[in-house]
Image (cartoon, helix red, strand yellow):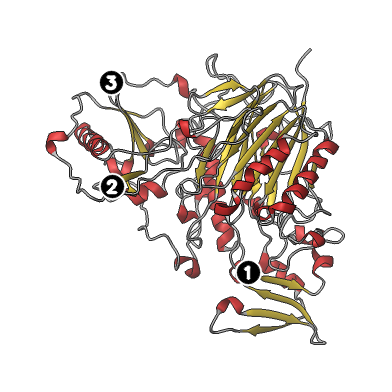
């Protein structure tokens, strides 16, 4: 008898506002969540949270422990004996902090459960309860990355990013991705045109994420991506729809543009709609957007259309998930700040949809419509996952690969001391004639998909101070150039020692121990200052903004302010003379760096610093 299908519940919840009033809201929120669990009776629960700890995370992060403990100690989850929790709480690490939380609860009836080790690239059996909190950079069972700052130029500092885990459930392999994209900062900018500058930035970040998963070294798996996408409706068209036949008046505040408003009135001079930078107030606000179901508004929900070839979604029949009132007494009302929108979604790849047993009930809905859950109502997808599906053997030793070309682990590399892979020479023609016999392959992501429009004048005012990046020329790297560059990099490593949090900072707790440790934070020596690792090509800022990885690559160094550190020829590191071979058969279409691997000292540098 084969393995049974798994009743799964996938939930996304932006929990930021519940930490503003934790004494009341944490209990209300968890009770509503657990009542939904009891009603749907899942055996695998994936809860993806954004803004863990709230906006004032320095003061509120201490309440995260209580939040998780309320869930783990609940009667509804008493039979879930396998738990994994990943909480990115280290707000002292500005370059890594995302405030994302991935929580997974597995019922005792599911015995064949494994989680992917992104370091050793293999599955590990899941037993017991493990909580990873504080600084989790060294945790190998997740992949986490923060989006480059130039993705969201209007925001001076952002926590936006993603965190991925990979699971094998009764023989079916799938990725579960938590994501948080940027919001609309101004209604005026959002209503100028569609797609707005905010929509374009969200699209760029999501394209970057999908492209990364399509080309990474872990092999391809069906994936569910659920989080706060901050998708908004076509605000320009919504306002035109709501104001047909109305008279427009602009109230200008020359001292403070934030107080400027657009007012739309009818023939009786009755004010129907008011739009400000952070105001969106309709005369019949709740009736228009909530009761009974705003089917008219769904036609303006367009942001997902750009990803039709890569993502799909079950039909939405619930009201917009944002922005709800944060007052307990107004749980069913929208705030009059933004046009209501379906910000929170559960999306899946077309390959993941083949894992779903659609003969059984699939339920896609909003959680806690009559309960105050904060400004975002959680969104859930309840489904059944087929067993032993979603894997394709391309060779006996790579069970989980699903490639359109030769398996990566079968590539033949030159047997020399230094191996070079030039990532910029890739062409899709290298596999266009290869036969593909799997229905579970990803659609190829094209270069056109990565294009994005220029910044608007307003966004340009707050752009990153870094100079614009230019595409590297498609040049070969000579042995002498490579040897010289590698010697210089190793010299820097020797002269500028690194300090980083190690795995010892991550504490794994069992349920019978003291529940949480004192959270590990990145420690920066007071007598030292942090800076980007310098290169003589001036490409440090380029490298940081191009960094699309949660690997162990170092991007910062600490400089002793009391000393002037200079490179010395006597301390330079010499590399053994050897033949350098440029390898063409293992390449990445989107990454612009070169891997240089020395037997004793692996190094990865960007192509523009190597050439």
Q: CA distance from mark 1 to mark 2?
A: 43 Å
Question: Pointers 3 and 1 in contact (CB under 8 A)?
Answer: no
Residue that numbered label 2 is attached to: 559
Q: Is residue 193 above or below residue 400?
A: below
Earlier in the chain: of badge 2 and badge 3, it is: 3
Look at discs 1 and 2 and give the one toward the viewer: 2
Quick one: SS at disc 2?
Answer: strand
In the rendered image, which residue does mark 3 sit on? 416
Question: For the residue labelled by badge 3, is the local secondary structure a helix, a strand or a loop?
Answer: loop
* Circle 3 Cα neighbour tier, 10 Å, few/some/many (<14 / 14–19 / ≥20): some
In the picture, which quadrant includes the N terminus?
Answer: top right
- Residue 79 coordinates in the image, percent (x, y): 77, 27
Residue at image mark 1? 187
- Res 214 → quadrant: top right
Q: Element at badge 1? A: helix
Residue 229 screen position, x and y as percent:
63, 51
């Amino acid at each position: 008898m084969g393995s049974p299908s798994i009743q799964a519940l996938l939930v996304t919840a932006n929990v930021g506002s519940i930490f503003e009033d934790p004494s009341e809201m944490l209990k209300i929120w968890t009770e509503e969540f657990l009542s939904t669990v009891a009603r749907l009776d899942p055996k695998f629960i994936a809860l993806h949270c954004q803004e863990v700890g709230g906006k004032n995370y320095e003061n509120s992060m201490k309440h995260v422990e209580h939040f998780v403990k309320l869930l783990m100690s609940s009667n509804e989850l008493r039979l879930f004996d396998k738990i994994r929790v990943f909480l990115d709480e280290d707000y002292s690490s500005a370059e890594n902090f995302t405030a994302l939380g991935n929580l997974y609860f597995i019922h005792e009836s599911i015995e064949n459960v494994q989680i992917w080790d992104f370091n050793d690239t293999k599955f590990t059996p899941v037993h017991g309860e493990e909580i990873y909190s504080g600084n989790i950079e060294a945790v190998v069972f997740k992949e986490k990355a923060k989006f480059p700052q130039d993705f969201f130029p209007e925001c001076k500092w952002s926590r936006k990013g993603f965190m991925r885990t990979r699971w094998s459930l009764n023989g079916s392999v799938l990725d579960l991705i938590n994501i948080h994209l940027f919001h609309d900062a101004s209604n005026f900018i959002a209503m100028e045109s569609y797609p707005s500058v905010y929509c374009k930035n969200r699209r760029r970040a999501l394209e970057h994420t999908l492209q990364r998963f399509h080309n990474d070294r872990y092999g391809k798996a069906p994936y569910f991506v659920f989080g706060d996408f901050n998708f908004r409706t076509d605000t320009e068209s919504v306002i035109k729809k709501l104001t047909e036949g109305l008279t427009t008046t602009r109230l200008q505040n020359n001292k403070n543009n934030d107080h400027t408003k657009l007012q739309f009135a009818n023939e009786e001079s009755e004010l129907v709609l008011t739009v400000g930078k952070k105001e969106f107030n309709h005369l019949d606000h709740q009736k228009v957007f909530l009761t009974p179901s705003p089917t008219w508004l769904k036609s303006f929900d367009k942001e997902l259309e750009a990803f039709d070839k890569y993502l799909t979604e079950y039909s939405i029949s619930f009201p917009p998930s944002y922005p709800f009132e944060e007052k307990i007494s107004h749980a069913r009302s929208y705030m009059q700040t933004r046009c209501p929108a379906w910000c929170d979604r559960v999306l899946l790849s077309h390959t993941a949809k083949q894992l779903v047993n659609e003969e059984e009930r699939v339920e896609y809905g909003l959680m806690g419509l009559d309960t105050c859950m904060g400004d975002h109502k959680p969104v859930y997808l309840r489904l059944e996952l087929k067993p032993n599906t979603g894997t394709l053997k391309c060779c006996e030793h790579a069970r989980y690969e699903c490639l359109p070309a030769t398996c990566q682990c079968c590539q033949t590399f030159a047997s020399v001391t230094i191996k070079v892979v030039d990532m910029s020479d890739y062409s899709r023609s290298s596999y266009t004639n290869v036969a593909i016999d799997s229905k579970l392959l990803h659609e190829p992501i094209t270069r056109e998909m990565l294009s994005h429009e220029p910044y608007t004048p307003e966004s340009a005012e707050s752009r990153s101070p870094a100079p614009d990046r230019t595409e590297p020329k498609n040049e070969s790297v000579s042995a002498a150039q490579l040897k010289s560059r590698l010697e210089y990099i190793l010299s820097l490593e020797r002269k500028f020692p690194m300090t980083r949090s190690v795995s010892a900072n991550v504490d794994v707790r069992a349920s019978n121990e003291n529940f949480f440790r004192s959270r590990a934070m990145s420690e920066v020596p007071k007598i030292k200052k942090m800076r980007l690792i310098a290169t003589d090509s001036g490409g440090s800022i380029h490298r940081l903004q191009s960094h699309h990885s949660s690997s162990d690559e170092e991007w910062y160094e600490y400089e002793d302010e009391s000393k002037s550190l200079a490179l010395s020829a006597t301390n330079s590191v010499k590399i053994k003379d050897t033949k350098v071979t440029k390898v063409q058969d293992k390449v990445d279409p989107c990454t612009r760096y070169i891997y240089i691997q020395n037997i004793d000292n692996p190094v990865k540098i960007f192509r523009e610093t190597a050439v």
